[in-house]
Amino acid sequence: MPEIKYANPETVEEACSLLHEHKEDAAILSGGQSLLPMLRQRVGSYDKVIDINDLPDQDYIDVTDGEVRIGCLSRHRDVATAEAVERHCPVLAEVAAQIGDVQVRNRGTFCGAVAHADPSGDPPVIATLLDATIVARSADDTRTLSGDSFFHDFYETALSKDELVTEVRFPALSANEGAGYEKYEPTEGAYPVATVGAYLSLSDDGQITEARLATGALEAGPTPMEDAASLLEDRQPTDEALTEAAERLGDDTMPVDDFEGSAEFKTAISKKLAKDALKTARDRAQH
């Protein structure tokens, strides 16, 4: 392994200054569950590793202004077990509880997974589905980015090379809103072959006023399935309506044949996942 210099900043400002100095030659180390395997396999080439684990007060999870806010050092396990997450955005707790294995959940950070943008990762899909707000800090500025347009391609996002994701904000869901998330893994803890997230908002008379669907692992990144979701709006959330949208989602996906399965198999799986996720979203919105 080539020699890599190590930095251990004590403030967010110092970390951003180092990123500004080294840009694409620097990598952020938070949980390390993605970065360290990449370094061992020489997938990435970096001159500097910036370890942010000693940044103070960055492992928070709180609810402010109708948002569940997650600091950049909050671990997946923290998100999965936080009472505030379970109360205000239960699907987020479910997603975090199913990420990887115990080690990944104990060490990996939710914000780091969003920034890493693994096409098979769970956090990018839920951030896309719920249009999370992603807070990015640089040495000179702080900006917020929209979750549904943050992910561009394989491991590519709207982040600049000198920006650090310091917080991800998810909407606190009201009583008439519900979200569900389903995935298919060949074995427990393996990377998913297909994931689907669903969100529904219902009117007082039970009609769907807003629907969202997003897939993961099937394409180059999390993909909003707008045509399928549009089939549900202004309709009652009957099993027939949910099935129609799930079928459309599967037909609109563009998976490829690989060692994990044929495109036909992945399409069929995505339809089943979509229907299950939609049913969960409906049940929660009707509760």
Image (cartoon, rainbow, N blue to C red):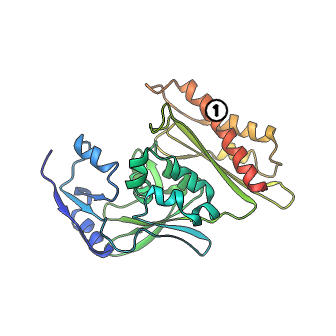
Image location (x, y in percent) of residue 78: 47, 60
In the shown orientation, is residue 6 left or right of residue 275? left
Report which quarter residue 139 is drawn in.
Answer: bottom left
Q: Residue at x 41, y 57 (%)?
A: 109
| Towards the viewer: 101 or 241 | 101
Q: How many marks?
A: 1
Q: Which residue is mark 1?
A: 251
Is 262 situated above or below 241? Answer: above
Report which quarter residue 184 is drawn in.
Answer: top right
Q: Residue at x 21, y 53 (%)?
A: 46
| Towards the viewer: 259 or 244 | 259
Q: Residue at x 51, y 23 (%)?
A: 262
Image location (x, y in percent) of residue 188: 48, 36
Q: Residue furthest left?
A: 3
Is 186 situated above or below 27? Answer: above
Instruction: Tell me the SS state at disc 1.
Output: helix
Residue 19 in sight from this viewpoint: yes
Image location (x, y in percent) of residue 247: 69, 34
Image location (x, y in percent) of residue 254: 54, 33
Location of the N terminus by quadrant is top left
The amino acid type, in three-letter code, at marker 1 is Asp
Location of the C terminus by quadrant is bottom right
Q: Residue at x 52, y 50 (%)?
A: 97
In the shown orientation, is residue 160 left or right of residue 24? right
Number of other residues with Cα within 10 Å of mark 1, as a class: few under 14, some 14 to 19, many 20 or more: some
Residue 209 in sight from this viewpoint: no
Q: Residue furthest right?
A: 205
In the shown orientation, is residue 231 left or right of residue 194? right
In the shown orientation, is residue 124 left or right of residue 30? right
